[in-house]
Image (cartoon, rainbow, N blue to C red):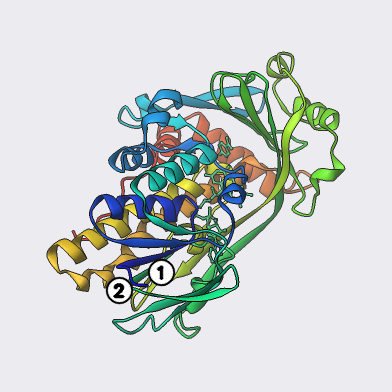
């Protein structure tokens, strides 16, 4: 078998890159370890930056998003008994975000790929890139007990934080920068009306809480827990009671509770892999970086890599500029580190880290007090939340 770009992973990174390339006449094959149902069963992100929406539109997969996505022009941060609204259009040049679940994005992309008849191997085992530092790389894999070889010109590692691609970069070139937080988010999805029209990020002495949503009838809530916590330790009633304790009283009083349709714990961590390219292999999305969900950046950062990778492959195939692959990593990393910073800042300042009121607690209170009570501070939060401009391969 032969293709131009072999894509490892059918998450949002792999599927969106595949759709954009196929639309541009660049042949690609996706190799996914899991089944399509398994990929769709993962409940993750909920907030899309404008750049993400624009790229999905460019890929021609935004009909459902345009019909059902919820435009949000702000969100609240509850701090020290106050609710401060971050007015996105006012503070960030008229921009907003769109609430639309990653599950729906993935489903739209899967349907679009099926619609154009592009090749995706689901349940592909032992996927392994080879000869990435030659001009004839290839990928081997197994499927239904048979072994296969896919010859290609480039390999896009879109295989997430536990994938195979990152490890193909030589150890003497690879550097991974990591920060682990002693925190997790216990998340609950429920078919109940959201408690507010916009998201509420709530700080509290008992710990952080977030009120989000997927639609006018489906809510998504999170509470900070230890990174070792298990969702099995929490009944629905216990979750709702703790969430209410952490919300402003007038919000807690109007919270509609119900049976959870999903309950899970996501540990919080930050990581960045450098470089994101070696030879004919490039890394995208969670294969290269992880952010804590506090800034709503994980999915959006992955899509920003897809934008850079797509523009790169267009220049390679349209303009014979194969040399530009050497710019890929630095182009992505410049924006990744700024987004890592924002996600780290939101995590560090909105969560409870100490059982006692110590120096760091006071600094946290001063930091939030300054940022939320100054237009400069709220502007900084807003322009990062709507998403920084996509980086350009060439100046
Ligand atoms: P993905 O991990 O989505 O996809 C990688 C794909 O590669 C998977 O389908 C996997 O099965 C496949 N794969 C892995 N190894 C393979 C191999 N060897 N061979 C073939 N295929 C292989 N982001 C937010 O913005 N907000 C959130 O609230 C949020 N919550 C999250 C909660 C959890 C529990 C997790 C894990 C992440 C969360 N994220 C959130 C981040 C998340 O949305 C990611 O940023 C996003 O899925 C990244 O997309 P991909 O890069 O495509 O990686
Ligand atoms: C979500 O709705 O899942 C969500 C929203 C905002 C975040 C994180 C998660 O910062």
Is 169 displayed left or right of 184 in the figure?
A: left
Position of residue 320 relative to residue 306, above or below, is below
Dot 2 or dot 1: first in sequence order is: 2
The residue tagged 2 is 153
Neighbourhood count class around disc 2 (C-alpha, 10 Å): few under 14, some 14–19, many 20 upward: some
Q: Cβ(mark 1) to ligand 1 < 8 Å? A: no
Count neighbours of disc 1 (C-alpha within 10 A) and say few if under 14, some if 14 to 19, many if 20 or more: many
Res. 255 visible in picture: yes
Residue 334 placed where, x, y %? 36, 59
Viewer-proximal residue among 377 and 188: 188
Q: Which residue is under mark 1?
A: 276
Q: Residue at x 17, y 69 (%)?
A: 321
Tell me the quadrant of ligand 1.
bottom right
Q: Nearer the viewer, mark 2 or mark 1?
A: 2
Quarter of the rendering occupied by the N terminus: bottom left
Residue 117: percent from left, percent from top: 36, 50
Give coordinates of residue 354: x percent, y percent: 76, 48
Whole-angstrom CA distance, mark 2 to mark 1, is: 17 Å
The residue lying toward the viewer, choosing from 180 and 320, is: 320
User: Is the residue 14 above or below the residue 145 in the image?
Assistant: above
């Amino acid at each position: 078998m032969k293709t131009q770009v072999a894509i490892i992973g059918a998450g949002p990174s792999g599927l969106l890159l595949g759709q954009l390339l196929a639309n541009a006449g660049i042949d690609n094959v996706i190799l996914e370890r899991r089944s399509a149902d398994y990929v769709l069963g993962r409940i993750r992100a909920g907030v899309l930056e404008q750049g993400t929406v624009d790229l999905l539109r460019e890929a021609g997969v935004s009909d459902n998003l345009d019909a059902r996505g919820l435009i949000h022009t702000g969100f609240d941060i509850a701090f020290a008994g106050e609710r401060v609204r971050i007015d996105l259009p006012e503070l960030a040049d008229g921009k907003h975000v769109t609430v639309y679940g990653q599950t729906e994005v993935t489903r739209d992309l899967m349907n679009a790929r099926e619609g154009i008849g592009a090749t995706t191997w689901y349940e592909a085992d032992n996927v392994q890139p080879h000869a990435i530092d030659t001009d004839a790389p290839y990928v081997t894999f197994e499927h239904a007990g048979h072994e296969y070889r896919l010859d290609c010109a480039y390999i896009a590692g879109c295989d997430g934080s536990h994938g195979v691609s990152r490890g193909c970069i030589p150890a003497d070139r690879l550097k991974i920068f990591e920060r682990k937080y002693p925190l997790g988010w216990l998340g609950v999805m429920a078919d109940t009306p959201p408690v507010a029209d916009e998201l509420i990020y709530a700080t509290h002495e008992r710990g952080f809480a977030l009120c989000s949503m997927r639609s006018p009838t489906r809510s998504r809530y999170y509470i900070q827990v230890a990174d070792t916590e298990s969702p099995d330790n929490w009944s629905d009633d216990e979750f709702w009671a703790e969430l209410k304790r952490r919300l402003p009283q007038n919000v807690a009083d109007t919270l509609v509770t119900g049976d959870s349709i999903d309950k899970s714990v996501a540990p919080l961590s930050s990581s960045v892999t450098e470089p994101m390219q070696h030879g004919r292999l490039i890394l995208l999305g969670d294969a290269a970086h992880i952010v804590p969900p506090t800034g709503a950046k994980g999915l959006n950062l992955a899509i920003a890599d897809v934008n850079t990778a797509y523009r790169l492959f267009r220049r390679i195939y349209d303009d014979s500029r194969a040399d530009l692959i050497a710019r890929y990593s630095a182009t992505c990393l410049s924006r990744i580190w700024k987004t890592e910073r924002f996600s780290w800042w939101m995590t560090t300042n909105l969560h409870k880290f100490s059982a006692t009121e110590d120096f760091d607690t006071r600094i946290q209170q001063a930091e939030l007090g300054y940022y939320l009570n100054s237009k400069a501070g709220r502007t900084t939060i807003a322009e990062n939340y709507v998403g920084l401009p996509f980086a350009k391969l060439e100046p």
